[in-house]
Image (cartoon, grey):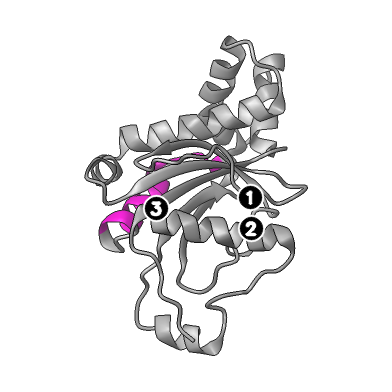
């Protein structure tokens, strides 16, 4: 049976929320992962969410949100850092595919954040393009330190907030879609041990709760 997918920001978020709860409980339904769905989406895609997350191998989007083929437009980089290619990919999801929701997904024990914290503290630099990743995470680490925070979760949350703010600041397409109510951006923090997600920040989506999962 082909599932009707959400078309509004809140509906899209609720579907993701339900999928994550199934994953956490150990009772995933694996929707849209069969031959019928494969045939349905072969001519074109209409994903209901853009998932911009960290490249960490433990953060597989379709698994932790219990989704399938054609559901999520996934963009991932180490430490969910943004460059022109990432911004263009997210804008494609919003402007061309008509996706109503962008999720910025960070997680605890993030290697990119940990490496940046060490680099800032020790004054060291990484080799190759890893240095570029660290440079892009550095503003988040500096802001967290300036606020007097020391816990890992506080650095992760600040980096998620910074990424959401940066996305809306740099992309007029995304910002306009949010302002018009066509889309929303939600920053989530994922917990590796239990698979739950926690809301860090939202833009264009009013929620009465502070945590999910």
Left or right placement of residue 179 versus residue 168 in this view: left
Q: CA distance from mark 3 to mark 2?
A: 16 Å
Question: Is residue 18 covered in magenta?
Answer: no
- Labels 1 & 3 near each other (Cβ < 8 A): no
The picture places residue 85, in percent across and down from the top left corner, at 40, 49
SS category of the residue bearing label 1: loop
What is the quadrant of residue 111 in the picture?
top right
The main secondary structure of the magenta stretch is: helix
Q: CA distance from mark 2 to mark 1?
A: 5 Å
Which residue is at 26% across, 56% downward?
95
Q: CA distance from mark 1 to mark 3?
A: 16 Å
Residue topped by disc 3 = 10
Which residue is at 27% across, 51% downward?
182
SS category of the residue bearing label 3: helix
Residue 162 shows up from this direction: yes
Question: Is residue 83 covered in magenta?
Answer: yes
């Amino acid at each position: 049976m082909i599932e009707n997918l959400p078309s509004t920001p809140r509906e899209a978020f609720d579907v993701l929320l339900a999928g994550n709860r199934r994953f956490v409980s150990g009772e995933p339904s694996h929707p849209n992962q069969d031959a019928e769905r494969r045939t349905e989406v072969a001519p074109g895609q209409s994903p209901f969410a853009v998932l911009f997350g960290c490249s960490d191998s433990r953060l597989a989007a379709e698994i932790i949100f219990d989704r399938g083929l054609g559901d999520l437009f996934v963009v991932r980089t180490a430490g969910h850092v943004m460059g022109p290619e990432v911004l263009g990919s997210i804008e494609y999801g919003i402007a061309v595919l008509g996706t109503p929701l962008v999720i910025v997904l960070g997680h605890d024990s993030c290697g990119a954040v940990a490496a940046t914290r060490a680099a800032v503290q020790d004054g060291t630099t990484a080799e190759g393009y890893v240095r570029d990743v660290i440079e892009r995470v550095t503003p988040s680490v500096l802001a967290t330190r300036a606020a007097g925070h020391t816990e890992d979760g506080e650095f992760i949350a600040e980096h998620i907030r910074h990424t959401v703010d940066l996305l809306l600041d740099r992309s007029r397409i995304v910002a306009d879609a949010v302002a018009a109510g066509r889309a929303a951006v939600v920053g989530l923090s994922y917990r590796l041990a239990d698979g739950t997600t926690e809301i860090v920040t939202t833009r264009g989506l009013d929620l009465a709760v502070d945590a999910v999962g």
